[in-house]
Amino acid sequence: MIEQYLPIFLTLTAAVLFGFVMVKLNEWLGPKRPDPEKLSTYESGMEPVRTARERFSVKFYMVAVLFIIFDIEVVFMYPWAVSFHDLGPIGFFSMMTFILILLVGYFYVWRKGALQWD
């Protein structure tokens, strides 16, 4: 049984080894010319205006969570779309119910103003 997984283990080992070798080659062969501009917080040369410990608005996190939720929705739709002909009317109506629930959630979030960037 383990011999069936041997190609996977070899591929993963080769990938990790390749990544490690490339990082080390960059450290050994790459240019080493540090200057104050390169070592600054932002390489653009602009001084930071505020501290990095500043609090963000909750809306940033809300939009991120909403993106993840609606992105996961698409993950559930792919298998349904692939086997659409085999599922028949029950599969169709169950997916329409799923989409309707998502639309209700979307309109709720919209009405609450979570998508506003004011």
Image (cartoon, rainbow, N blue to C red):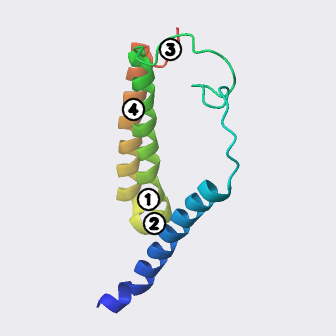
Q: Is residue 94 left or right of residue 83?
A: left
Residue at 42% across, 45% down: 73
Q: Is residue 36 left or right of residue 65?
A: right
Q: Are marks 1 and 2 in contact (CB under 8 Å)?
A: yes
Give, as a three-letter code, the residue at label 3. Answer: Gln
Give, as a three-letter code, the residue at label 4. Answer: Val
Q: Alpha carbon of mark 4 to alpha carbon of mark 1: how far?
A: 24 Å
Front tag of 2 and 4: 4
- Quarter of the image for residue 90 reads bottom left
As rendered, which of 67 and 58 lies closer to the eye? 58
As rendered, which of 92 and 77 lies closer to the eye? 77
Does dot 1 land on a helix, a strand or a loop?
A: helix
Front tag of 4 and 3: 4
Front tag of 4 and 1: 4
- Earlier sequence position, callout 4 versus callout 1: 4
Residue tagged 2: 83
Residue 93 rendering spot, x and y as whole percentages: 38, 50
Q: Are marks 4 and 3 in contact (CB under 8 Å)?
A: no
- Label 1 crowding class (10 Å Cα cut-off): few <14, some 14-19, many 20+? some
Q: Alpha carbon of mark 3 to alpha carbon of mark 1: how far?
A: 32 Å
Front tag of 2 and 3: 3
Residue at 45% across, 66% down: 83
Does dot 3 land on a helix, a strand or a loop?
A: loop
Q: Which mark is residue 116?
A: 3
Does dot 4 land on a helix, a strand or a loop?
A: helix
Q: Alpha carbon of mark 2 to alpha carbon of mark 3: how far?
A: 37 Å
Q: Are marks 2 and 4 in contact (CB under 8 Å)?
A: no
Q: Alpha carbon of mark 2 to alpha carbon of mark 4: how far?
A: 29 Å
Residue tagged 1: 80
Q: Which mark is residue 65?
A: 4
Residue at 65% across, 26% down: 36
Vertical placement of 109 versus 20: above or below? above
